[in-house]
Image (cartoon, rainbow, N blue to C red):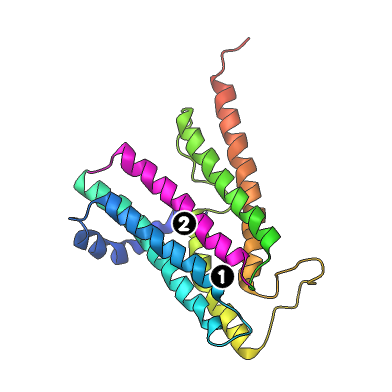
Amino acid sequence: MVLDRHRGFLDPVLDPWTHVLRKVPPNVITWVSFPFALAAGFLFYYSDPASYPERWFILAAAFFVMLNGMLDLLDGRVARMTGKMTPVGDFLDHTMDRFADVAILTGLSLSPWGAPRVGLVAIVVTLLSSYIGTQAQAVGAGRLYGGMLARADRMVLLMGLPLIDLYLAHAGKTLTFLPQDWFPGTQYSLGLLLYYIAIAGTVTVIERFVRVMLFLRGREPSA
């Protein structure tokens, strides 16, 4: 959750766009963000480190991830600026985020850059951590965003690591510090990212679950 604590550094970039989009309904911005995530997922899936020009698709995928992430930040900012924060908008925002997560991670997991089984775990724990975060709000514990890996961190890594992997693919190199027999899909940094999401996501699920349970236990009347 490193980047969630330092979102302020994006204000100089986001403020002008917030003003530009202030007349656009926030829900429209939310809807528009999803096709970019879908495009990123398809581009990850069809990219191939062993083939030219397909290896360059991951740069386009990273670009669409960036667009999805920017719009995800802007819809809430526009809603707050214009006083248009509504339950419908909150529900739509969180739902589209989950659709985007699944689209991007599925495309990456099924691509030559990653390992499908590891990607499946990454997708499951990503959804579970988000579910617990929103369910915490439903039971009065407040919306939980904390944990070892937040969405902002994941999105930034998905934007940056393709640059490393494109260099490796173009140079005909792979990462070799982990044995492929034991850790399939770790020959590229995007494959390592799926492992990290799977592990960090599992820790986040456990952490959030414990926090909510402790909160609810503390509210129970003593016997």
The amino acid beneath tag 2 is Ala
Q: Main secondary structure of the magenta part?
A: helix
Judging by the rendered image, the residue that carries numbered circle 1 is: 45
Q: Nearer the viewer, residue 176 or 114?
A: 114
Give the label on residue 61, or none. Answer: none
Q: Quadrant of the C terminus?
A: top right
Q: Which residues are magenta?
A: 84-111
**Which image quarter: residue 37?**
bottom left
Secondary structure at numbered mark 2: helix
Query: Measured from the top left, where is residue 151 in percent x and y?
Result: 49, 55
- Residue at point 38% right, 66% down? 67
Judging by the rendered image, the residue that carries numbered circle 2 is: 100
Residue 215, relative to residue 100: is it above or below?
above
Query: Measured from the top left, where is residue 79 in percent x and y?
Result: 26, 48
Q: Nearer the viewer, residue 98 or 77?
A: 98
- Residue at point 47% right, 52% down? 99
The amino acid beneath tag 1 is Tyr
Secondary structure at numbered mark 1: helix
Query: Measured from the top left, where is residue 53 in percent x and y?
Result: 53, 86
Residue 211, relative to residue 166: is it above or below?
above
**Which image quarter: residue 176?**
bottom right
In the visual, does 134 lie left or right of 110?
A: left
Residue 107 magenta-drawn?
A: yes
